[in-house]
Image (cartoon, helix red, strand yellow):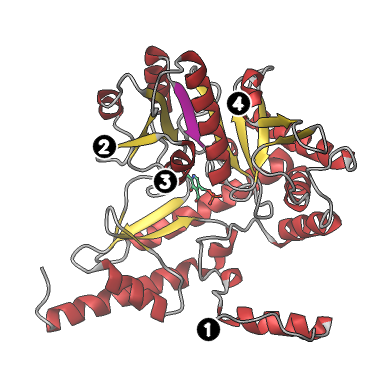
Amino acid sequence: MRSTLPLHGLSAEAVTEELMRTKSNDVDWRSGRTNLYVQFGGDDVLDVAKRAAHLYFSENAHGVAAFPSVARLQQDVLDWMLGLVGAGPFADGCFAASGSESILVSLKAARDWARQRRPDIGVPKIVVPQSAHPAFDKAAGILDLEVVRTPLHADYRADVAAMEARICSRTIMVVGSAPQFGHGVVDPIEEIAALGVHHNLWVHVDACIGALIAPFARKAGATVPAFDFGVEGVRSISADLHKYGFAAKGASVALFRHRCWRPSYAFEFDDWPIGSYGSVGLAGTRSAAPIAAAWAVMRYLGEEGYTRIAAEILEISRRLRTGLEAVDGVTLVGAPDLPVIAWRAPGLPIQRVAEAMTAKGWFVRPMARPQAIHMGMITLHQGPVVEAYTADVAEVIAALHQTERAEGGQE
Ligand SMILES: Cc1ncc(COP(=O)(O)O)c(C=O)c1O
């Protein structure tokens, strides 16, 4: 039944109490019971983000004339992000509320670019590896583009030959991820970009996950394949501050190799009573809070702070992988370049594994290809629960195999 707005209000205390009650059945992410949906860079980082968001709670990023400080914070974050992804002097970008929005803005720029050159193109196509985030299909639906998804290699990276085979006269864009969400591998961006250059296509790199961990993971000793503007041909990059940037949710950027594409994401209009209107990115009114939080966390951590956290995350990820590998009946999915983990339980229906882990209080999500438990992005709140998690995995797998044997259902 639809609820109606109550006639009488409540006291502020009562409202907070009701909220606390309402959220009491949500997963307790702080205890490390889920690594999906929340990325955690430490209590100090969270505190910095919250304080900044609080300070800018009411300010509107659409009104930078009234709030010039927001314009400055935004520009700082964009500049810092452009620096991290090896952008040259003519690069530019805009803020977005999510990775999906950054992807949408990038696709729009690619579509406008293609339409300018070939107004008769019809419905343009974009070629993406099977592993690309659904945000590409969502954006394509809005922008009237057709998505062609191509197979992956056995190591889950994009098969560039398969991508090339699907290029046709209507193709405008090729995409790679750094890394992709499913298996954590970075696509062969250099090959994808070379393909783009060869066929004169727009090359987009989805670095929503990687942009704010890859540079620091490298400093911490990890090897991460090249994926940014240092790769010739890459024209746009989507990068999330609210993932490995540890900013408040609602902070992402779309970055462009050249500011000449700005008209695609900076909107101007004057044919209405108010006269001149302008906005950058998709939204009009936008909360300044996520921008301020992103700025504050980046300023607080600096390169050193991010590198320290990246090193800690890599270590947690290593401990998790080692722990899972030691479990009889568990195999890891692929060899991720960055700390995204998925594990399989060959011979067991993954849904039953997920249910058993859920019964032990973990928030888990099975993935489809391959059938596995997708742990997603590892961050600091997993550190204290690595042993508890792997112990529960071991118990669940052993118990399920026993049940399967008893039911005579083992393959
Ligand atoms: C690789 C990748 N791209 C894009 C997105 C979409 O980001 P958002 O959920 O912020 O829209 C995600 C989300 O997990 C992702 O992992």
Residue situated in front as seen by the camera: 95 or 26: 95
Q: Residue at x 83, y 56 (%)?
A: 58
The dot on residue 1 is 1
Q: Amino acid at mark 4?
A: Phe
Mark 4 and mark 1: span between their CA atoms?
Answer: 47 Å
**Does any atom of ligand 1 lie closer than 8 Å to the CB of label 4?**
no
Residues tagged 2 and 1 counted as in contact (Cβ below 8 A): no
Instruction: Please rate how many residues cluster around mark 1, counting C-alpha atoms within 10 Å: few if below 14, some from 14 to 19, many from 20.
Output: few
Residues tagged 3 and 2 counted as in contact (Cβ below 8 A): no
Compare marks 4 and 1 and give the one earlier in the sequence.
Answer: 1
Q: Is residue 30 above or below residue 186?
A: below
**Residue 306 located within the stretch drawn in magenta:** no
Read off the magenta span. 202-206
Q: Amino acid at mark 3?
A: Gly
Image depth: mark 3 or mark 1 in front: 1
Mark 3 and mark 1: span between their CA atoms?
Answer: 42 Å
Q: Amino acid at mark 2?
A: His
Q: Amino acid at mark 1?
A: Met
Q: Is residue 127 above or below residue 137?
A: above
Is 302 placed left or right of 275 in the picture?
Answer: left
